Image: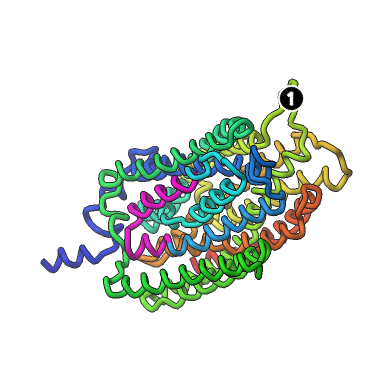
Amino acid sequence: MNNSSTAGNLPAIERPENEAILNDRRFFGHPRGLGALAAGNLFNSIAWSGVYAILIYYLYSPYTKGLGFSQGQAASMIAAMGACNSMFVILGSWLADRLLGMRKAIIAGNIVKAAAFGILAIPAFSMTQGRIFAFISLILMSLPIMGASNSSLTGQLYRNGDSGRRDAAFTIHTVANNIAGLVTPVVIGFIGQHNYHIGFLISSAAALMYGLTILLTQHKFFGTIGDKPVNPVSVKDLKKISVIAISILVTAVLLITGLVLKKVISFDGIMNIVVTFTFIIPIIFLTNLVRKKDISQADRNRLNPFLKLFLIQIVIALTGTMTSTAIAVFTEAKVNRVLFNITFAPATFTSVSQAYGLILSPVFVWLWTNTKASRVKTTYKFGTGIFLYAFSYIVLAIPVLIGTYDKFSPMWLLGYYFIFGIGDNLTYPIGNSLTARLSPPNYETQMQTAWSQAGTIANGISIILFKIFTTADSQLQLFPIMSAVLFVTGFLVFFLSKRVERDI
């Protein structure tokens, strides 16, 4: 009786019934649960890359084809959605840890996501109706119910000392993302030139497939890992939290609606509110996490290297946030996209990036799993990736600095994507792997969420920058600036490497 009770109180990863899950190597040397999560990432990437391939063009294309926003407004709206998504991932991770469990959170989150994309699939019978539907969709996109459950669930499939396979696991997720990103932007980008709504419908269906994948495999592939909330909230506390949350939400909606109708605040005013919260909420969340009383002193010491790397991740996330819209506008307005008398959709070039990633990612999986490269310090991998990011922006900065042309050769973009792809394999999966490695027991999802808050702050900064860089020409100046900032950041990582590795 006592032994059973004790086992029930252990984290799922330490329970005897999950031993077979941790020892499983039937998915390319990894647990089959990783295969399910990678498939989920595949569908997730189809959904999001499909939306991002056409969303900004849909927002600023003239009605009736689009919704007639300016380029600056469209970029700011997408950045604001990204910021809110990053902020509310805190709520999603709380739901996963305290109420739903990671697996249910993934399933529920993808139902909401499918609804968000599905609303955009409804044709706009008037510009007003289309804009209302777009705002509703962007709000739903800002509600990531699943939080960081996929990353957290991935980390829990491996023992703490199994760093090589864990690094490879997150790189496998990158492979899945690249497979989806290779085809999706081309297909949906082409479709979007003729009918945006069909493209959004495909993304909605992909989100539903993600949830279905986890639903069908959860019991067989994961055992009890991620089944229950790791730190369930009591019924009494749940009622109290629900009342407070609903009160805050209703008050905020009524207040903002009233101020907009009375013309007290404008579009820019709403953006300023979003920016303010992108700084306040992550700071509160991180402070609360660090001060948790049930985290041991040893685990608390390991939060120190996490916080150092978090500040560096903000810089990396900012460059990615800016390029997600700046590159899109740049590609449409400044790149010669005519080949053999065929005009390629701007989103086609995103697929080139994913093709590079699809080729490169398996190489890094092999390196981290089967060679002595697995012994390379994690911080060295991370820092080298940042240097490569900086070099990739130099490639885009060269044509900007040497002269002004009506149209740039697409070769500059191809070179940028290749170097960026190598860097991405050395930073994105390694950052997630480091976070999983540094997470205190029962706080895996919240730690992955904390890591994602770098993106929240980066989105807030990007909203400010988009008020300055409002046109395609002005956004070109970001490339040399980003390159210089990343070089400094890369040197900082190598300077801090010894201290960070000592504390891990």
Residue shown at the point (31%, 45%) measured from the top left = 215
The image shows residue 392, relative to residue 446, as above or below, that is above
Query: In front: 17, or 259?
Result: 259
Type of colouring: rainbow
Amino acid type, callout 1: Leu
Magenta span: 92-117
The reply to whether residue 372 is visible in this rendering is yes
Is 125 on the left or on the right of 241, as rendered?
A: right
Q: Is residue 82 magenta?
A: no
State the quadrant of the N terminus.
bottom left
Q: Main secondary structure of the magenta part?
A: helix
Q: Position of residue 418 (x, y in %)?
A: 66, 39
Q: Is residue 116 magenta?
A: yes
Query: In front: 24, or 443?
Result: 443
Is 359 on the left or on the right of 466, as rendered?
A: left
The image shows residue 453, relative to residue 398, as above or below, that is below
- Judging from the image, what secondary structure is the residue with disc 1 in? strand
Q: Position of residue 296 (x, y in %)?
A: 38, 75
The reply to whether residue 367 is visible in this rendering is no
> Furthest-right residue in view?
403
> Furthest-top residue in view?
340
Q: Position of residue 391 (x, y in %)?
A: 72, 48
Query: In front: 240, or 68?
Result: 68
Dot 1 corresponds to which residue? 339
Is 220 on the left or on the right of 304, as rendered?
A: left
Query: In front: 214, or 172?
Result: 214
Badge 1: few (under 14), some or many (20 or more) residues near its Cα, within 10 Å?
few
Q: Position of residue 381 (x, y in %)?
A: 58, 53
Image quarter for residue 422? top right
Residue shown at the point (30%, 41%) measured from the top left = 216
> Furthest-left residue in view?
1
